[in-house]
Image (tube, rainbow, N blue to C red):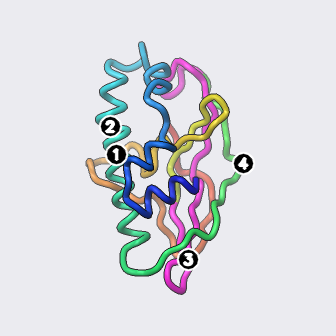
Amino acid sequence: MKQLVRAIKNDSPAIGATVFFPEAAYVSMKTGEIPDPTGDYVDRLIGFYDLDLAAYHDRLFGGAPTNLVRIDANAHFAQWIEPGVCENKIGYWHVPGVRLVFRRGARLVSVAVFSLISWRGLWYVVHLGPNPRPIDVGTVDDYENGAGTPGPSGGC
């Protein structure tokens, strides 16, 4: 998660790629379930992720000194997603609504990471901002003044 914060701070898709769900894993999960898993990965997942990195960067690091204070997650919200759910042929662990808590100037603020997936024992971002969304713009999930509360929003 610290690498994700580094990607957001630098508005760097290249750094962000190191913590994003791997393409080969996504294609394995989706082949036979959706028409073009590779295209969906590149056009939708990576497309939104790159837009979201920029939106998180602007919201968190524009104007005031900002430093990561902590990362909050609630293990009670982790759940096993069965094969066949969310158009996946392989099951996986999922945790929604992990919070990144920052000191921005003199105040505490936080944002959510919409959805993380565990693949072969490692956790990856699969949706930084909300999914689905009505338009193709970078979107910050659940920005709050204060630490906020980890937990749902994210799903498939």
Q: Of helix, strand and loop, which one carries label 2? A: helix
What is the magenta range?
83-111
Marking on residue 44: 2
* Crowdedness near tag 1: few (<14), some (14–19) or many (≥20) residues, C-alpha within 10 Å: many
Q: Is residue 147 left or right of residue 125?
A: right
Marking on residue 75: 4
Q: Nearer the viewer, residue 149 or 116?
A: 116
Q: Earlier in the sequence, mark 1 or mark 4?
A: 1
Q: Nearer the viewer, mark 3 or mark 4?
A: 3
56 is higher (above) or lower (below) than 91: below
Q: Earlier in the sequence, mark 1 or mark 3?
A: 1
The residue tagged 3 is 103
**Residues under labels 1 and 4: Cα distance?**
26 Å
**Residues under labels 2 and 1: Cα distance?**
6 Å
Q: Nearer the viewer, mark 1 or mark 4?
A: 1
* Crowdedness near tag 2: few (<14), some (14–19) or many (≥20) residues, C-alpha within 10 Å: few
